[in-house]
Amino acid sequence: DKVACYTVSLDLPFAQGRFCEAEKISGMHNLSDVHDHSFGKNYGVLIESLPLKLLTRAVFVVDKHGVVTYAEYVPEVTNAPNYDAALGALQAAAA
C-alpha cells in the first residue's frame, strides 16, 4: 500500500494495456506520453534524433513528498536498468 508503480511510454493506452495483459502484468499504472511528449521532455528521456521518437529506458523513485530520490537513465535502450539499485532506492523511500 506504500508503493505505486507507473510506466510511461509513447505507446497508446490500448497498446500498453494489451502488452500488460499478454505479459500478465498487474498493478501497473500505464501513462502515455504520445501526444505532447511532455514527460519525455521534462525528465530528459525523449530521444528525438531517431526517425520515430522514443523514450529512453529510465527508472525514477519518487518519495511520499514528491522528491525524486533515485534516477537512472539507461544509455542504451536495449539494456535493462539496474533493478537491484532501483529496488534498494524504492525500499529506502518506502521506509
Image (cartoon, rainbow, N blue to C red):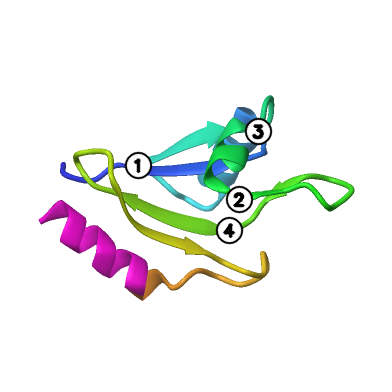
User: Residue 29: horizontal and vertical position, in percent?
Assistant: 42, 36
- Does label 4 or label 1 sit earlier along the sequence? 1
Judging from the image, what secondary structure is the residue with disc 3 in? loop
- Does label 2 or label 1 sit earlier along the sequence? 1
Residue beneath disc 2 = 45
Residue in the image at 61% along x and 41% along y: 40
Q: Nearer the viewer, mark 2 or mark 1?
A: 2
Quarter of the figure that contains the N terminus: top left
- Does label 4 or label 3 sit earlier along the sequence? 3
Mark 4 neighbour class, 10 Å CA radius: few under 14, some 14 to 19, many 20 or more: some
CA gap between label 3 and label 1 equals: 24 Å
Amino acid on which the number 3 mark rests in the picture: His
CA gap between label 2 and label 1 equals: 24 Å
- Does label 3 or label 2 sit earlier along the sequence? 3
CA gap between label 4 and label 2 equals: 7 Å
Amino acid on which the number 1 mark rests in the picture: Gly
Residue 6 in the figure: left or right of residue 54 = left
Quarter of the figure that contains the C terminus: bottom left
Is 70 or 8 nearer to us in this picture? 70
Residue beneath disc 1 = 27
Residue beneath disc 4 = 57
Q: Nearer the viewer, mark 4 or mark 2?
A: 2
Residue in the image at 49% along x and 36% along y: 30
CA gap between label 4 and label 3 equals: 15 Å
Which segment did they paint magenta? 85-95
Residue 54 in the figure: left or right of residue 7 = right
Amino acid on which the number 4 mark rests in the picture: Arg
Residue beneath disc 3 = 37
User: Residue 82: horizontal and vertical position, in percent?
Assistant: 44, 73
